[in-house]
Image: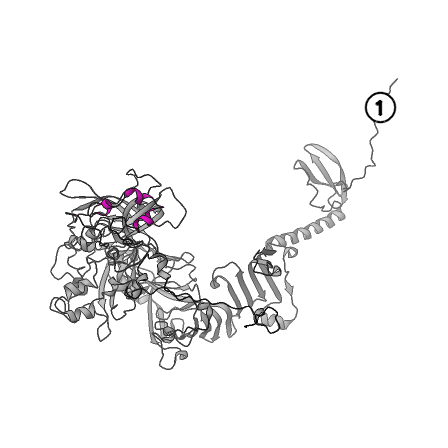
Amino acid sequence: MVNDTTRADSTGVDLIFPFSDRSGNPYLDKDQSPLFLNEPSNVKREIIYNPVTNTYEFQSTIGDFTYRTPTVMSFEDFQKYQNESSVSDYWKERVKTTGESEGSRLIPKIYVGGEVFDKIFGSNTIDIRPQGSAEVSFGVASNRRDDPSLDVRQRRTTNFDFNEKIQMNVIAKIGDKIEFKANYNTESSFDFENTLKLKYEGKEDEIIKLIEAGNVSLPLNSTLITGSQSLFGVKTELQFGKTRVTAVFSQQQSETQNITVQGGAQQNEFQLTALDYEANKHFFLSQAFRDNYEQAIASLPVITSDINITKVEVWVTNIGAATQENRNIIAFTDLGEGEKQKIFNQYINPRPNGNIPSNKSNDLLARLDTARVRNINEVTNYLTGDPLGLGKNNYFVPGEDFVKLENARKLKESEYTINSKLGFISLNTSISPDQVLAVAVQYQIIGKDGVYQIGEFSDQGVAAPKSLVVKLLKSNSLNVKMPMWDLMMKNVYAIGAYQVQKQNFIFNILYSGDNQGVPTGYFMEGNDEVRGVPLIHVFDVDNLDNQLNPVPGGDGVFDFIDGAATTGGTFQSNNGRLFFTHLEPFGSYLRDSVFKDNPELADRYAYDSLYTMTKTAAEQYPDKNKFILEGYYSSSSGSDISLNALNVPQGSVKVTAGGSPLTENVDYTVDYTLGRVKIINEGVLNSGVPINVSLESNSMFNVQQKRMMGIHVDNEVNKDFRIGGTLMNLHERPLTQKVNYGDDPISNTIWGLDFSYGVESRWLTNLVNKLPGISSNQISKINVDGEFAQFIPGHSKAVGKTGTSYIDDFEGAKSSIDLKHIGSWFLASTPQGQTTDLFPEARPNTGLQYGMNRAKFAWYIIDPLFYDASGSLRPSNI
């Protein structure tokens, strides 16, 4: 027989974390740990007063069901419970209003007793509030180098690798008068991003109103003396009755800029010299196209050229990763040249009717074995041998007659621009001197049938890895005596602007080589057609009027004909390139055209070395580099004005329209972070008056120290009249006592007076109301402002009393070589440029014969162990 029984409930279970149930009496149930869950939302607690027993009952219900036995509290206990709850709720509310509890602060407030502390600092509290983050990484870097020449102990190096990232912002207050602010970030790029300021601010009845140290500013209401917003130093403000004195002693951390806008378009200046042409960027595709250039654009705006380029492939040295457009190429200098004087290799002969550039202009390709030329591994030996069967070698010189280029990169059409009428190419990016530029060209001639071609295209059946034969425009070996040097255009100048507008574009040519030293826009010598004539007309960039109609003598304004790089003209507006109509405007044009009847003047003015030498070599003739190209241009118009600066100091931007100051956030707004001003007053934009923006931009790199001292006194005579005075000095400290010309350290002083008078006038309102149709109840106001300032230039005493600057002190003109230093000894090369009788082996590509006549020299250092007196290894003859 089996008995079915239930197990008795056990009450002896011990929990690891025991808890007690609530009793239902809030006076007894104190606040529990937040780890315990709150009561469900359907549980309600009610307090019911029983007037019969004068007690309070606490009931807990779920809906209409009372799930807990009610508890009773006497009247006296309930009053005590209410008082304690009110006090607790009060302090909790106070903590919420302050935003944080004292226990959660990193540094709690410090209270300092005593009346002396309170009188000095305004209160008895010290409050320090740091914010930010700090990250520290610590490691060990060990490097082992298995170099047999090193000692075993020196092959392993171990160093600590320590790095920290700190971003900190501290605000500290001592009482109500002293405040300290610091902002520091170890990853900030520039010094001005880290700020530091200590400020003492006095009460209303104290003489000392303000003392600041650290990042300070000196804002002034004057338009003639603008003050500065980005300073680091000490600033004080004192008040003596109605007179307020502000003084500053600091280091200036900013630079002043001025931007002028006319008609909503920003005005910018540019200045170049004749030496500043754009090198290695613009190239003619053939000598014949170069010879036709001046004649084709002589009748601008009409282009008188009968060619039309239809297809081009451009190849350059690949300096990056391999691409799908890479091919091996063999580029020839004389390919496509039909004039004997323009063919570099004397063994290549022009063909009849070879004046039209093509692969058949000369006999170069016809006399070569094309199969061996296309073999990239054999072509050099083949061409430097006897490819033409002349019985001699080395008449095809690498780098001069041809260039072998493996894995050349084909440029995309977006990387260059072709002028299909004038036959030249403009690259978007200049190529370096050691890079190769080669092309294949296909074009037509108006009035003639057929298509002419120079070089080979990659889609014409020559499959890789066979090499393409193309036209060489620039070699990796520079030789200014070769005809190829003339293919690089030297009459294109970049003004440093994009999207240039024809309106408000001004260009002028000046000459600064006359005796008086002042640049002039004309020659003071020459015949009547040259002397006193504006240089822009002399150089044929001013022959038309505003409607592009020919005008004898020009109209004094540059002929802005857009599209120079694509169809022909004088300017390319999208990238700001200036094209002269002559190939060598400051060289052969002056010699052969302007001063052709006066060789003496031609020698004086012509800058021939600019076109016969590299820019570096031509720079060594400063007496010829006297032509200045300068002007103004307007960028795209609009209400936005770029300040060309980032993180502009707050309040440093001042805007005037026609000399009248504008009001920020009324007439214009400023984005100090991005450095932009937006004119929001349409009346200012539509008026057409010049808008001037002055600002301070933080110096990215403070190399030269600038000390700024200033004092400003303001006296309020009465509530309507105020008068002030300002005295400021800016002093620069040179890095060295020898200062280059143009970097002269200044010590400028400026002082001035200003006043303002403003009074309300009822009689002016009454006077205006007497006019017909006008009735106003507003009180009129009369404001009169005036300023005066004097600027006193000076220089730092560090450069002497008279201010000495050096054009060149010639310290580097002499260099010494110590012949006793064997580390500078090298085997001498065979002299070049000598007669072949003395050094016949100096001819190119002579092989091992090149060094046969060298003296047999050798030098070395004997180890000390061989000549040490005590050494056993020392030979007897040492």
In this picture, residue 289 sits left or right of residue 121: left
Q: Is residue 841 above or below residue 289?
A: below
> Vertically, is 203 above or below 313?
below
**Nearer to us in this view, 192 or 152:** 152
Q: Percent position (x, y) of residue 308? A: 19, 45
319 relative position to 39: left or right: left
Please say whether residue 375 is one of the residues in the magenta stretch. Answer: yes
Q: What segment is highlighted magenta in the picture?
A: 355-384
Quarter of the picture containing the N terminus is top right
Residue at the far right: name it: 1
- The residue labelled by disc 1 is 5
Q: Secondary structure at mark 1?
A: loop
Asked if one can make out residue 671 in the rendered structure from this viewpoint, the answer is: yes
Picture coordinates of residue 683, whole percent (x, y): 29, 56
User: Magenta span has 68?
Assistant: no
Whether residue 770 is visible, yes or no, is no
The type of residue carrying mark 1 is: Thr
Q: Which image quarter: residue 221?
A: bottom left
Residue 236: image x %, image y %?
A: 49, 73
Question: Furthest residue to the front?
Answer: 876
Q: Residue furthest bottom?
A: 801
Q: Nearer the viewer, residue 252 or 276?
A: 276
| Percent coordinates x, y for residue 340 in the rendering | 18, 53
Residue 678: image quadrant is: bottom left
Nearest the viewer among 723 and 371 is 371
In the picture provided, is 181 more to the left or to the right than 279?
Answer: right
